[in-house]
């Protein structure tokens, strides 16, 4: 069968980015009436923005084949019979090697929608250098009732601490409740070094502001505080991608912000319907310079953090 024949839409199907969508009118976000076709076209429209954040990274995927609010499940391992636009990569795990998924371009991105994926969670490393992460993510997760202004202040304080160490950082909404402070890195340090470094950052912020933050997982320790989740920086852990949708009411999107935009509202302020307009009217990329930033951490860097900040 020719490529053209394989991609030709059949009755009841449609094509987006040369990917055949089955059940294109299936509603994935019932509150907005957003269909599989709508979501595929959304990703096609914003592909230049999201692709640099997801291509060639192992992915964990939240799939909701029947739509948000119905049965959803996480998938991280590849299954048999993958279409050509979804790629497998073998990664060592404690029980042996497993196949993960990754994408290379817009066809792979739209192919995820065909699978019913509503959230894309990439690793902090790329398929060619799985053991050397190239980004750090500090997830600022507020307890119920914590006002947005405090979450924004936490991001600013994390940025200031990182600047003390000579590291540039960027910020995005999680699309849920909080913010992600993201540090691009040259892929040199190990996962263990990254975990220890991010833990030291979180604990230093807690030391400076013990009434505001916690780095402890227990719910009792988190009451009225912001949980500084540094565990996103362990091997195999993930965080939602910049410009990925979330499987939440309103179809929110995890959205990069300029630092001076933090006061503009909650984490779910940008959605599938509103984000394209934002991107079309931006005068500058809020993450300008992100992919050109060259900086790294090391064991010596970690030791300096512990020595100089205490």
Image (spheres, helix red, strand yellow):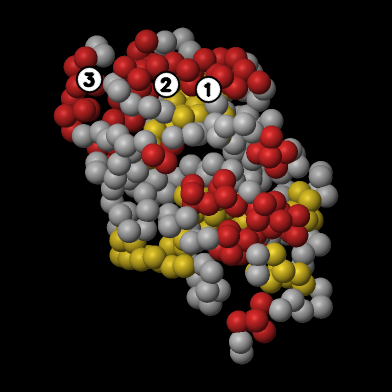
Which of marks 2 and 1 precedes in the sequence? Answer: 2
Cα distance between the residues tagged 3 and 1:
27 Å
In the figure, 135 relative to 164: above or below?
below
- Label disc, if present, on residue 159 of the rendered structure: 2
Residue 247 is left or right of residue 161, and the answer is right
Q: Which quadrant is the C terminus positioned in?
A: top left
Q: Residues within 10 Å of mark 2 (few under 14, many from 20)?
A: many
Q: Nearer the viewer, mark 3 or mark 2?
A: 2
Q: Position of residue 125 (x, y in %)?
A: 37, 49
Q: Position of residue 266 (x, y in %)?
A: 65, 25
Question: Of helix, strand and loop, which one carries label 3?
Answer: helix
Identity of the residue drawn at 75% across and 42% down: 273
Which of marks 2 and 3 precedes in the sequence? Answer: 2
Residue 57: tell me if it is visible.
yes
User: Where on the picture, by quarter, is residue 200?
Assistant: top left
Q: Position of residue 50 (x, y in %)?
A: 56, 48
Could you tell me if the residues under marks 1 and 2 are in contact, i.e. CB atoms within 8 Å? yes
Identity of the residue drawn at 69% across and 30% down: 269
- Label disc, if present, on residue 306 of the rendered structure: 3
Q: Which quadrant is the N terminus positioned in?
A: bottom right
Q: Residues within 10 Å of mark 3 (few under 14, many from 20)?
A: some
| Residue that numbered label 1 is attached to | 259
Q: Nearer the viewer, mark 3 or mark 1?
A: 1
């Amino acid at each position: 069968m020719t490529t053209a024949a394989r991609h030709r839409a059949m009755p009841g199907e449609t094509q987006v980015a040369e990917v055949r969508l089955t059940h294109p009118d299936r509603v994935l976000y019932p509150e907005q009436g957003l269909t599989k076709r709508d979501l595929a076209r959304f990703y096609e429209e914003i592909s230049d923005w999201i692709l640099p954040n997801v291509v060639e990274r192992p992915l964990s995927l939240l799939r909701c084949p029947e739509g948000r609010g119905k049965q959803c499940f996480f998938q991280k391992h590849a299954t048999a019979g993958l279409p050509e636009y979804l790629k497998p990569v073998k990664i060592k795990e404690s029980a042996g090697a497993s196949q993960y998924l990754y994408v290379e371009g817009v066809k792979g991105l739209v192919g995820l929608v065909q699978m019913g994926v509503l959230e894309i969670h990439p690793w902090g490393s790329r398929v060619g250098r799985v053991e050397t992460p190239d980004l750090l993510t500090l997830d600022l997760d507020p307890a119920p009732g914590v006002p947005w202004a405090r979450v924004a202040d936490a991001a600013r304080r994390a940025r200031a601490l990182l600047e003390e160490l000579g590291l540039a950082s960027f910020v995005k909404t999680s699309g849920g409740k909080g913010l992600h402070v993201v540090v691009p890195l040259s892929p040199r340090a190990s996962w263990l070094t990254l975990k220890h470094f991010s833990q030291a950052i979180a604990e230093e912020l807690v030391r400076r502001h013990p009434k505001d933050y916690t780095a402890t997982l227990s719910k009792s320790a988190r009451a009225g505080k912001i949980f500084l989740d540094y565990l996103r920086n362990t091997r195999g852990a993930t965080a939602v991608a910049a410009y990925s949708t979330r499987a939440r009411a309103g179809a929110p999107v995890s959205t990069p912000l300029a630092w001076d935009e933090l006061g503009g509202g909650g984490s779910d302020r940008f959605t599938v319907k509103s984000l394209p307009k934002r991107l079309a009217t931006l005068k500058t990329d809020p993450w300008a310079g992100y992919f050109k930033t060259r900086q790294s951490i090391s064991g010596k860097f970690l030791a300096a953090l512990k020595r100089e900040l205490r």
